[in-house]
Image (cartoon, grey):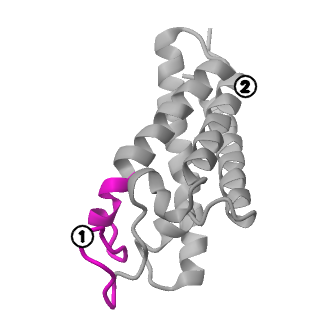
Amino acid sequence: MNWGGWALWGFAATLVLTTLLSAGQGMGLTRMSIPYMLGTMVTSDRDRAKTLGFGMHLVSGWLFALVYAAAFQSWGAAGWRRGAMIGLVQASFGLSAGMRFLPGLHPRMASEQQGPTAVRVLEPPGFLAMNYGRLTPLVAVLAHMAYGAIFGAFYILPR
């Protein structure tokens, strides 16, 4: 494992991923904010949730880079195409399966079956996170593919 490459390019790829997701939200393409969703899992303070969620998202991105690096190690090759394909798989799983069980894990998110309560005030994402906007899946897939492409392009396998 190239630990220096993992640390540097996992961090860089995570920053790009977070920037693209935030840009998509800022441009009105999606209402989804993964850092906000993560942050509200640990605090009800909305401003604090954004800060904590960003940190949680950064750490998660770094940890996911370990999976990418392990895949590259097992294949004996890295590369932007391979990284982008892993990003496509990651986003597809997260959107199709992950978002469906998120309301069961998130203490402040309503579910599809039971609406909001005094505590569960966040809207559930729904299938492909479509409750956050029609273009949410596209934004998420492209951002995760960019993450994988960046990590794959710059991660160098140890000799």
Task: Tell me if mark 1 has few (under 14), some (14-19) or many (20+) residues whose alpha carbon lies within 10 angstroms of its own.
Answer: few
Q: Nearer the viewer, residue 46 or 128?
A: 128
Q: Residue at 36% x, 77% y: name it.
A: 108
Q: Residue at 61% x, 14% y: name it.
A: 158
In the rendered structure, find residue 113 and report the number of the disc placed on it. Answer: 1
Tell me if residue 85 comes above or below residue 93 in the rendering: above
Q: Which percent across, then down, holds residue 3?
A: 59, 30
Mark 1 element type: loop
Q: Quadrant of residue 142?
A: top right
Q: Which residue occupies the extreme bottom position in the image?
A: 118
Q: Which residues are magenta?
A: 99-119
Q: Quadrant of the N terminus?
A: top right
Tell me if residue 26 comes above or below residue 127 in the rendering: below
Q: Which residue is mark 2?
A: 154
Magenta span contains residue 41: no
Q: Quadrant of residue 4?
A: top right
Q: Nearer the viewer, residue 131 or 7?
A: 131
Q: How many marks?
A: 2
